[in-house]
Image (cartoon, rainbow, N blue to C red):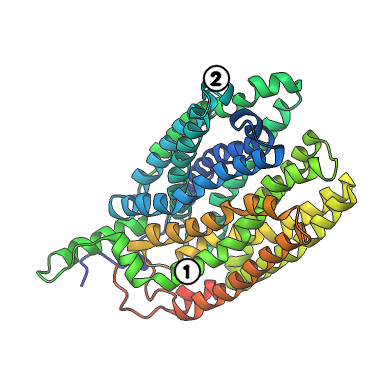
Amino acid sequence: MSSSPPLDIVTPPSKTISRRASLAAFSGSAIEYYDLVAYGTAAALVFGDLFFRDVSTHVALLLSFATFAAGYVARPLGGLLFGYIGDKYGRRTAVLLTISVMGTATVCIGLLPTYESIGSFAPVLLVVLRVLQGLAVGGELGGAVLISVEHAPKNKRGFYGSFSTAGAQGGTLLATIVFAIVTLMPDDRFSSWGWRIPFLLSAVIVLVGMLIRRGLDETPDFKQSQADRATASASASAVKHNPIRDALSKHPMTILGITFIMAGMMSIWYVITVYSLSYAVNQSGIPRTSMLWVVSAATLVVVLMNPVWGALSDRVGRSRLIVFGLLSEAVLLFFYFAMLGVGNLALVFVSLILVAGLGHAVVNGIFPAFVVESLPAAVRYTAGSFGMQLAALVAGFAPLVATALEPTAGGVWTVSALCLALCTLGAFSAIYIVKIHAPRQNSAITETTQPSSKETSSIK
């Protein structure tokens, strides 16, 4: 038996600690996703012209979105790499590394010469920096989720955990607003140097994020897991802890379920925030700056609604709300594209607000606590991050797939149907994980103790 007291009887985190952890998670996620969305927005608006020449406009846009998707190929690897560090050496160490790698790559993109200056080396370097971004983001989301939820009281995990993903949307909002401002510049100035401003601003906000995270202590769950491992390692028959091996061998179905839950939600988000920018401008005739402000408003709704849905999940349970959110988001996506077809900016605004607030924000606000309660602490960072980033790998190709399907007979309706299928699969997975694969003890490395009804009721 462990010589450390069970986590359930350890003094609960104070409100001050919980709030500070939520702030650290929010700010770090905001920085990481500011960098990510800055890239995605630039890919939609200017990268095709700046880094790909001698091809048609449509092919250049496809290639630009392909570089955006390249970062997603690296994200599962980043999830495993930083997950290993986070489960083995600490959440704090991992999240400090992710933010520094991401910030460096983003600033370098802002300094990158274009095709006109260095020819074919320009897109090659762009892809390399995009892959580094992908590795960092692969470990960031899982780390932010854990430092917010593991520092929270058990009866408020949904509320405090929601700030980690609200930070991601906060970064999305900030990047979109910055781009909306710089696109007010004359087109020639924006294309020559104005697009670089959002990337270079990343240097300042990364420094702020580093300062906030450096003062954060390790989470109670990780400390308990370390104590349990120390006790277990004293046994001659103990197997050396390897988070990657243990996560993949002991929790494959939970990882797969997390992937399915997140794939639909993330795919729809990148369809509406990345792909629909070019679609609205090119097909619906909506001004570029106006569309950026519409996306900014929808993103702000997600930031504000995240804690609302997170707090509600602490009262009524998580999986049923996740099912509601996934299906609502998928159905409302059809309405959004219908309004884009009409071309009325007010109707586009209303439809996107509904997708964001009654669909995306539901799942976005709840899944941090859901993931934590679906996995034991010893492999939570690795397994949770890997599942999330496998989903991100699927979602990262959504703008590319949508652009490729646009000229076909089904067009955007085929895109919406694919998103509905993914969300339906995710809804079934949310229920399946809860009923079959919930961990027997969330806080320990062992899984031999049956959970109390209080421990598991919140995710049912």
* Image quadrant in which the N terminus is located: bottom left
Q: How many marks?
A: 2
Res. 35 visible in picture: yes
| Front-most of residues 59 and 255 | 59
Q: In the image, which disc is placed on residue 117?
A: 2
Residues tagged 2 and 1 counted as in contact (Cβ below 8 A): no
Q: Residue at x 72, y 20 (%)?
A: 188
Q: Nearer the viewer, mark 2 or mark 1?
A: 2
Disc 2 marks a residue whose amino acid type is: Ser
Look at the numbered disc 1 and give the secondary structure of its residue.
helix
Please provide percent x and percent y for residue 197: 61, 24
State the image quarter where residue 198 is shown.
Answer: top right
Q: Is residue 446 left or right of residue 295?
A: left
Q: Is residue 155 left or right of residue 139?
A: right
Look at the numbered disc 2 and give the secondary structure of its residue.
helix
Please provide percent x and percent y for residue 243: 30, 60
| Front-most of residues 233 and 46 | 46
Q: Residue at x 68, y 31 (%)?
A: 179
Please provide percent x and percent y for residue 8: 37, 68
Q: Residues within 10 Å of mark 1 (few under 14, many from 20)?
A: many
Q: Which residue is mark 1?
A: 256
Q: Residue at x 41, y 49 (%)?
A: 78
Please provide percent x and percent y for residue 319: 58, 72
* Image quadrant in which the C terminus is located: bottom right
